[in-house]
Image (cartoon, rainbow, N blue to C red):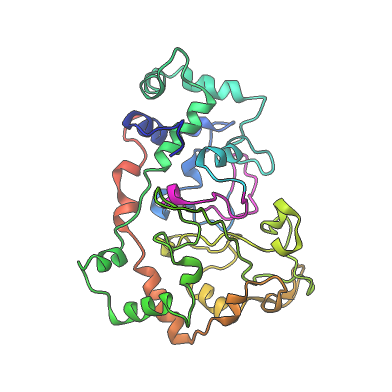
């Protein structure tokens, strides 16, 4: 938690209401939950997200499961490291438009909240002061709510605690996942099944990004703009196609997969990795990603038979936390 945004019950409850509040968008049609639905572990199951004006985002919505522990908060932005910082783009960004708040309507959107007596009372309880309904406090409240979205009761967690036993197939998948044959845990080995995890005991905050060989346009190593990974921020050739490894908690609920939603099922994801990348045979993006010069070398070292892939999918399905996606404290408020 940032020093200037301590948690409180009042602040978290205000943040929950704002998270589900469509009046927070420029045209009053889209809430944060429009792209981050609880039943889908706070993503939207679209290949590409869609903003309040209908504009399609170039990226897949990232699930918010355990987002408090992430060292970076976007698919490919090493410089965005707090929830408060991250939230500015969906609220105020113009390329693409997400929530659609801009200079022409910023005051009007806040006015909707100020005229609502319920919100006025909740902002006062959370922040105090004479005029607490500000954009800074909106952002802080939503961030406080997002930090409560903790998932840690999947069947895998229960097995780790000795409460249940995984099936033989699931256990084979677990051994593969954490072993030196499949190498999955090299990028997904943290408690949150990613490699950008930090808590209050962490001495360092690692921020690795990876090129998994999804594209190799014209044999040049290129990915399609504006989805070229960390390269979009740095302009460095070695950053072409490098994206963050997402958390795999509840991954069975987040299809379609990858940064651009271009792979529909977990089975297809595993088959792509087993092949060492993806060969796009024709069209605008034609090229063999398996020989992308910027590809992470770990991808080429994965050795997965069809049975291995099936076992891994079975294990990944044990990471689903049903209590998380049905927890009423994360759901839309029952009252206005």
| Secondary structure character of the magenta stretch overall | loop
Judged from this view, the residue extending furthest toward the top is 130
When the figure is inspected, residue 264 is found, relative to residue 59, above or below; the finding is: below
Q: Residue at x 36, y 50 (%)?
A: 150
Q: Is residue 51 magenta?
A: yes
User: The C terminus lies in which quarter of the figure?
Assistant: top left
Give whichever of 65, 285 is nearer the camera.
65
When the figure is inspected, residue 305 is found, relative to residue 153, above or below; the finding is: below
When the figure is inspected, residue 234 is found, relative to residue 7, above or below; the finding is: below
Judged from this view, the residue extending furthest toward the left is 163
Magenta residues, as a range? 50-78
Left or right of residue 38: residue 221: right
- Could one spot residue 251 in this view of the protein? yes
Q: Residue 335 location, x and y as percent? A: 32, 31
Q: Is residue 281 magenta?
A: no
Q: Residue 313 location, x and y as percent? A: 42, 74
Residue 121 is drawn in which quadrant?
Answer: top left
Give whichever of 125, 234 is nearer the camera.
234
**Image label count:** 0
Left or right of residue 194: residue 57: right
Q: Residue at x 38, y 25 (%)?
A: 126
Judged from this view, the residue extending furthest toward the front is 203
Q: Residue 162 location, x and y as percent? A: 21, 68
Left or right of residue 74: residue 70: left
């Amino acid at each position: 938690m940032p020093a200037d945004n301590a948690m409180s019950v009042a602040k978290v409850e205000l943040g929950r209401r704002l998270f589900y509040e469509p009046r927070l968008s420029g045209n009053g049609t889209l809430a944060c939950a429009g792209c981050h639905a609880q039943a889908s572990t706070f993503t939207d199951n679209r290949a590409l997200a869609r903003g309040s004006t209908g504009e399609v985002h170039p990226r897949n919505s990232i699930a918010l499961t355990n987002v408090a522990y992430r060292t970076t908060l976007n698919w490919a932005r090493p410089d965005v490291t707090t929830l408060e910082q991250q939230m500015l783009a969906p609220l105020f960004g113009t390329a693409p438009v997400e929530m659609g708040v801009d200079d022409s309507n910023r005051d009007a959107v806040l006015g909707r909240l100020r005229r609502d007596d319920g919100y006025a009372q909740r902002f006062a309880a959370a922040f105090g002061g004479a005029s607490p309904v500000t954009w800074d406090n909106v952002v802080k409240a939503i961030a406080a709510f997002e930090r409560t979205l903790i998932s840690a009761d999947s069947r895998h967690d229960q097995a780790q605690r000795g409460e249940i036993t995984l099936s033989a197939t699931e256990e084979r998948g677990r051994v593969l996942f954490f072993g030196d044959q499949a190498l999955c845990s090299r990028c997904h080995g943290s408690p949150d099944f990613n490699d950008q995890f930090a808590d209050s005991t962490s001495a360092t905050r690692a921020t690795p990004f990876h090129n998994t060989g999804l594209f190799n346009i014209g044999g040049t190593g290129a990915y399609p703009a504006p989805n070229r990974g960390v390269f979009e921020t740095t302009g460095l050739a070695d950053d072409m196609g490098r994206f963050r490894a997402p958390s795999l908690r509840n991954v069975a609920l987040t299809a379609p997969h990858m940064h651009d939603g271009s792979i529909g099922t977990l089975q297809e994801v595993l088959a792509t990795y087993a092949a060492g990348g993806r060969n796009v045979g024709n069209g605008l993006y034609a090229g063999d990603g398996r020989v992308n010069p910027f590809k992470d070398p770990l991808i080429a070292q994965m050795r997965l038979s069809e049975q291995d892939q099936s076992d891994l999918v079975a294990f990944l399905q044990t990471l689903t936390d049903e209590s998380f996606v049905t927890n009423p404290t994360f759901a839309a408020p029952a009252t206005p």
